[in-house]
Image (cartoon, helix red, strand yellow):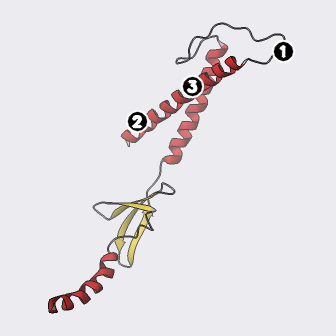
Amino acid sequence: MFRTLVIAPFLLLAAPAAAQNAPDTDNGRYTLNRTDDGYLRLDQQTGHVSVCTRRELGWACHPVPDERSALEEEIARLQKANAALKKDMLARGVTPPGTPQAKAQTPPQDGKSPTDAEIDRAIATAERIWRRLVEMIARLQRDIFTQI
């Protein structure tokens, strides 16, 4: 009993000191991963990564250079190039890969609007093209990240 009374004040004084040894995670907003020099801090709201190290006056976090904008620019460039290539292929009468061979149909000459079946086919084709484009972008991102 006497030992508990003597040790308890020391534990209460040690708790604030232990809390100062690691950066605050701001109520779960940040994810911290231990490194040799300190911590890598991931901001889960913005996706920004910082390196946090202990200094004389406390912890200091510095942003890690982000290549995200370069990746997004490359994705946008590839999307434009992909759309231009598909448009060129269609203009030459070639069906782009991954799209089913449709029966040759002439557009309505009497001013009628397309049928529901034609609209459904067009939507399905656009969805397939979109999925393939997203897969290509994801594959590109994986390739770029594995090279980093």
- Of discs 1 and 2, which sits in the foreground? 1
Which residue is disc 1 drawn over? 111
Which residue is disc 2 drawn over? 143
Mark 3 falls on what kind of element? helix
Q: Amino acid at mark 3?
A: Ile
Q: Quadrant of residue 126?
A: top right
Q: Residue at x 45, y 38 (%)?
A: 141
Above or below residue 132? Residue 11 is below
Of 3 and 38, the residue lying toward us: 3
Give whichever of discs 2 and 3 has the lower sequence position: 3
Above or below residue 101? Residue 17 is below
Please report contact status of discs 1 and 2: CB closer than 8 Å, yes or no.
no
The quarter of the rendered structure image containing the N terminus is bottom left
Is 128 situated left or right of 56 in this image? Answer: right
What x and y, as percent, mark residue 105?
69, 8
Which residue is disc 3 drawn over? 129
Of 120 and 50, the residue lying toward us: 120
What x and y, as percent, mark residue 131?
53, 29
Of 72 and 102, the residue lying toward us: 102
Is 8 situated left or right of 134 in this image? Answer: left
Q: How far is the residue under mark 1 from the one under mark 2? A: 48 Å
Q: How far is the residue under mark 2 from the one under mark 3? A: 21 Å
| Label 3: few (<14), some (14–19) or many (≥20) C-alpha neighbours in 10 Å | some
Of 111 and 138, the residue lying toward us: 111
Please report contact status of discs 2 and 3: CB closer than 8 Å, yes or no.
no
